[in-house]
Image (tube, rainbow, N blue to C red):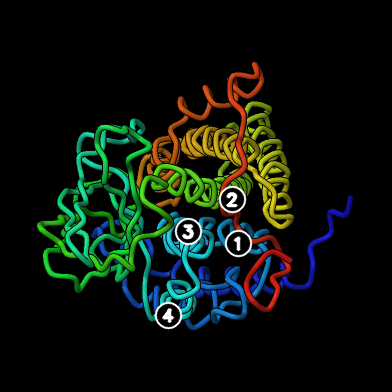
Amino acid sequence: MDFAPSEDHRMVRRIAREFAEKEVAPHIREHDEAGYFDRRYLDRMGELGLLGLCLPDKYGGGGLDYISLAVASEELERVDTSLRVVLSVHIGLASLGILQWGTEEQKSRYLPDLATGKRVGAFGLTEPNAGSDVAALEATAVRDGGEYVLNGEKTWISLADVADTFLVFAYTDKKARHRGISAFIVERGFPGFSSSSIHGKMGVRAGNTGSFVLQDCRVPASNLLGEEGEGFKIAMSCLDNGRFTVAAGATGLIQACIEACVRYATERRTFGVPIGEHQLVQRMIAHMVRDVEACRLLVYRAGWLKNRGERNTRETALAKWYATTASFEAAANAVQIHGAYGYSNEYPVERFLRNSKGAVIYEGSREILEIMIGQYALGLRQDRPLRRSLPGWPFEEDGRQG
């Protein structure tokens, strides 16, 4: 076992940290307070290679491994969750979904622009009445000659109002339940597509979240991703990638809590000494240190499996469940350590707490993941081989597993 980061990992950490600290951190309090999403950050992440870092060279990506994606996610969320969400949705859910399930024509058409940020990807699964219960989807897709006609509404979609390319899930056969769901690549410019933003969120206020409507939206049959009826499998495999980045980001949020609390605990004095000398403060910070180390091990193990091209649903679910739960606890304790100041946005821990709550809900709630891990332990859940696996790393010239 080698725990030393590679030169690529160190490079990605440096690039992501410098961007987040120098270009985003000075403005994040203002943007969060105003609920403002700065589109320029997406352009800058494209320029830095962050939007395609683990896509194969063949499609214009950085050709780096999946642990590099984890490192970038950790560093971006260390400053603000809205930055990590971009990687989760654009790379984890959308781009890697096309890489795993797309035809060569689809990959050649979409991935180069996604890798450079010329296109921004998003993921349309959740609906007003369908979240964890995916089979409750109401969106439909009806074949009409060389096209599918899509109707439905998706909500709580990250980057809904700024993305160009969407993976959309809809029923092609409602009677077949989850086996009748299919996946489509939908472009913003297709007639019948419209989107809007959601305001008044508890957290991730500096990120764009919204809804989109498909009203007799005509999608070329060539934009069917995978085969009819494979939509559920595709969605779950995409969520493996999204959960991986969420877990890595939660690790970065815990690290941010540690740094903020150590800084405050050495400056703030009570009863004549810095509060860091009080054992209960030390205990809360010690728990954060314990959890950030455990989270990294869980995330990097899942990344190691992804690099090998092996199924990692269980390991990724465990990492996401543990890391997001731990980050919520760390943020709550960070506010406690800051006392009344932690209740104000004068200090970042207030924002950390609000942001951390979302991650125990989206991309597999805390409860869903807990049940999954229990089912694995009891032998009630087993992963079957997928028709198409996410390519392992290093990538070959043709983009297949190396």
Whichever of labels 3 and 2 marks the residue nearer the N terminus, that label is: 3
Marks 1/2 in contact by CB < 8 Å: the verdict is yes
Q: Nearer the viewer, mark 4 or mark 1?
A: 4
Whichever of labels 3 and 1 marks the residue nearer the N terminus, that label is: 1
Q: CA distance from mark 4 to mark 1?
A: 18 Å
The residue indicated by pointer 3 is 97
Percent across and percent down for residue 72 are 59, 63
Percent across and percent down for residue 148 are 21, 59
Could you say which quadrant of the image residue 126 lies in?
top left
Q: Nearer the viewer, mark 4 or mark 2?
A: 4
Q: Amino acid at mark 2?
A: Ala
Q: Residue at x 21, y 51 (%)?
A: 141
The residue indicated by pointer 4 is 113
Percent across and percent down for residue 380 are 59, 19
Q: CA distance from mark 1 to mark 2?
A: 9 Å
The residue indicated by pointer 2 is 248
Q: Amino acid at mark 3?
A: Gly
Q: CA distance from mark 3 to mark 4?
A: 15 Å
- The answer to whether residue 230 is left or right of residue 196 is right
Could you say which quadrant of the image residue 83 lies in?
bottom left
